[in-house]
Image (spheres, rainbow, N blue to C red):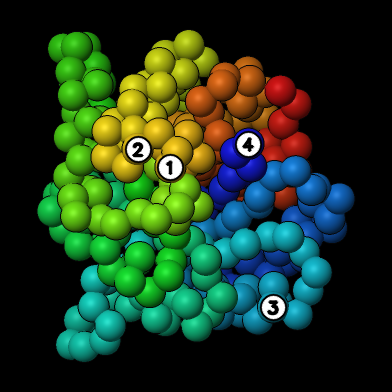
Amino acid sequence: MRTPLMAGNWKMHKGPGEAINFLNGLSDAVADVEDREVLICPPFVDIYALGRMLRKSETPIKLGGQNLYPAEEGAYTGETAPPMLKECNCDYVILGHSERRHVFEEDDSFINEKVKAARQYDLIPILCVGETEPQRDAGQAEEVVSDQIRGGLTDVEINSADELVIAYEPVWAIGTGRTATPDDAQAMHAHIRTILTDLYGEGIANGVRIQYGGSVKPHNVDELMAQPDIDGALVGGASLEVGSFERIVKFEA
Ligand code: PGA
């Protein structure tokens, strides 16, 4: 069975002081969680301190980056290399988030380079995909998501299901308080699993976790997680407070 992956994407929130306090609080709150994986993806400036804390503790919380640059090192001012994330105790990295696609104009081929770099350095990519509202209204949602997945995963070798996570995040649901209905989300997740089957075969496709993201909150997480192909959540706003993120991690489906 797929172990749910409950992830917080802090985006550009919390400096190191606040991040350390948060991790102390969350560690206590989820100490008894066993049947799900808990992940936080903080800003880069927090990662070293949090990585050290996690290395010394028994907590099941894992760490991920929000982005990377696809090179081992070099003259790339302002960027972060995959081995740096590894050294700071990251297991995961979010790639192709809609804010990267829309604010920073990243396209599928650049995201594809990043996914390859993540795999090369043994980081698990969380590849984010999702349609805009006009694309959904025009009936293009499945095609858009399919193109993003095939583009992001071109020539990416996946040998076991735990080497990849997909996050379906409809752009119109991110930070808006509007969530996809559980049925619409489930339909898209099933579609994504069909694409993964085509790319990697049924064995791997059935094991890859597909997260839902876009205004996941304590009040709607249970019905989303009850869907058979929703294997976790990528949570923005509601991951910034220990209490609300704890409730999301402890969903009841
Ligand atoms: P949100 O963000 O939960 O604030 O909608 C989700 C995301 O962008 O990953």
Residue 48 location in percent, x, y?
55, 80
Residue under numbered circle 3: 55
Query: Which of the image's four quarters has the C terminus?
Result: top right
Secondary structure state at the residue bearing disc 3: helix
Q: CA distance from mark 4 to mark 2?
A: 17 Å
Q: Nearer the viewer, residue 241 or 205?
A: 205
Determine which quarter of the picture holds residue 166: top left
Q: Nearer the viewer, residue 242 or 183?
A: 183
Secondary structure state at the residue bearing disc 1: helix
Determine which quarter of the picture holds residue 204: top left
Residue under numbered circle 1: 204
The reply to whether residue 181 is in sight is no
Residue under numbered circle 4: 1
Secondary structure state at the residue bearing disc 2: loop
In the displayed structure, would residue 114 be above or below residue 185?
Answer: below
- Please state which amino acid type lies under the numbered disc 2: Gly
Question: How packed is label 4: few (under 14 Cα within 10 Å), some, or many (20 or more)?
Answer: few
Residue under numbered circle 2: 201
Residue 157 location in percent, x, y?
29, 57
The answer to whether residue 44 is left or right of residue 115 is right
Question: How packed is label 2: few (under 14 Cα within 10 Å), some, or many (20 or more)?
Answer: few
Residue for point 19% across, 12% down:
139
4 vs 2, front mark: 2
- Please state which amino acid type lies under the numbered disc 1: Ile
Asked whether the residues under the numbered discs 2 and 1 touch, taking CB atoms below 8 Å apart as contact, a structural biologist would say yes
